Amino acid sequence: MHFEYYMPTRLIFGRGRLKELSHYPFPGSKALILITQGQSMRNLGYLGVVLKILEGAGIDSAVYDRVALNPSDAQVMEAAEFARNEKCDMLIGLGGGSAIDTAKAAAIMVNNPGTYWDYAKLGKEIVEKVLPVIAIPTTAGTGTETNQWCMISNRETKEKIAFGSPQSFPVLAVVDPELMLSVPPHLTAYQGMEAFFHAAEGYLANVAKPISDLYALDTLRRISHFLPIAVADGTNLQAREEMAVAAAQAGIIAALSECAAEYSIDHALSAYYPQLPHGAGMVAMSIPYFSYLLEKERKKVEIRYADMAHVMGWPGEQPEEFIDALKLLIREIGMSDLHLSNWGISQQEVDLLSANSFAAMSFLYNTDSEQRLQNNAACIIRGTVN
């Protein structure tokens, strides 16, 4: 057995703990705060709270408020230039995965030459200092606050790639479940299932480690129990807290293990359809994907399928129970009728999207299937398009 464990992010977790941000040393003297294009961070008062904390600590700040859902490499470069012009020496991602991923990606590009795609796609070496990042998530799903990965799209080439380096782990993550109370039910469901699939794929991946297995099973247990509660009653603070734990753990799983081919397929979908939420695409594909994997790789995955079913409250005697447990969870959160066609994806695009999924992130196809899913990705996508 061979593995490495590297988790440098300091995680501050708990209800109301955002106000404690100033209790920890800031890694710079001027922060660029990145938020999404909408007004939610302002309207909910979260941006104001962070600005007040920084001011009280004697930290200057600037705000970049143009991050989009499924952010692009062009936005990364724009944010990096903004940080340089403002002479910022640290970045704060405030919001969901889009804001935090953009902060981490821009932190790479402030001092390094070339374009972001030179590093994410072409493998150019990071040679200059990556600016430190503080992550403050207001959603429970991506887990980006506890790992090095940045999920960024290239609008011209229609690619979405996961990229990161040991330098792009946030130095500090403040996970305050009270910031998540305002997330509406459908987004709560999408985000929670994103964390679910990070855990499930990380548990099935052939690079899983003993410690990532522990996180994965506990994450699946929490989500299967508490996500339906959080969707039904967003004011239930215990459910929000449990989901925040699950999301942070899912991020750690993504750092220690890997996601799998379902992840690659969904990235291809959102590269062409940037308004498709990551978790929604994965919910739509999940039953065909996990059913295919069990059919083609039964001897390889059957024990782990049974393990996952067991922590989700099923006997865990047969691997098929995991598929049944997943169907039940999707029904409990009101997502049984979710189809890719809801976002305009058509049967005519299936072959193009499946080929893109392999071309952009082929390395994830190696983590879940000896037979490789490339030739069957089209079948998985086709089964979710009505």
Image (spheres, rainbow, N blue to C red):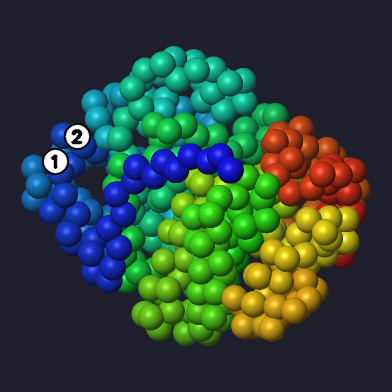
Q: Is residue 358 left or right of residue 199?
A: right
Residue 19 drawn at (x, y percent): 18, 61
| Residue name at image x 19 percent, y 34 percent | 28
Q: Amino acid at mark 2?
A: Gly
Residue bearing mark 1? 59
> Which residue type does callout 1 highlight?
Ile
Left or right position of 144 against 88: right
Image position, residue 386 (x, y; %)? 87, 65
Q: Position of residue 308 (x, y in %)?
A: 65, 70
Which residue is drawn at the image coordinates 74% and 40% (left, top)? 366
297, above or below 169, in the image? below
- Whole-angstrom CA distance, mark 1 to mark 2, is 8 Å
Tag 1: Cα neighbours inside 10 Å, few (<14), some, or many (≥20)? some
**Relative side of 173 to 243, left or right:** left
Q: Residue furthest front?
A: 1
Q: Quadrant of the N terminus?
A: top right
Label 1 SS: loop
Front residue of 29 and 172: 172
Instruction: Say few, some or many: other residues with alpha carbon within 10 Å of mark 2 (under 14 / 14 to 19 / 20 or more).
Output: some
Q: Earlier in the sequence, mark 1 or mark 2?
A: 2
Residue 342 visible in the shown view: no
Q: Identify the secondary structure beneath mark 2.
A: loop
Tags 1 and 2 touching, CB below 8 Å: yes
Q: Quadrant of residue 171?
A: top left
Q: Position of residue 379 (x, y in %)?
A: 90, 54
Asked whether residue 112 appears in the rendered view, the answer is: yes
Compare residues 41 and 23 and report the one nearer the observer: 23
| Residue ID at (49%, 55%) | 211
Residue 28, disc: 2
- Can you say whether 194 is above or below 206 in the image? below
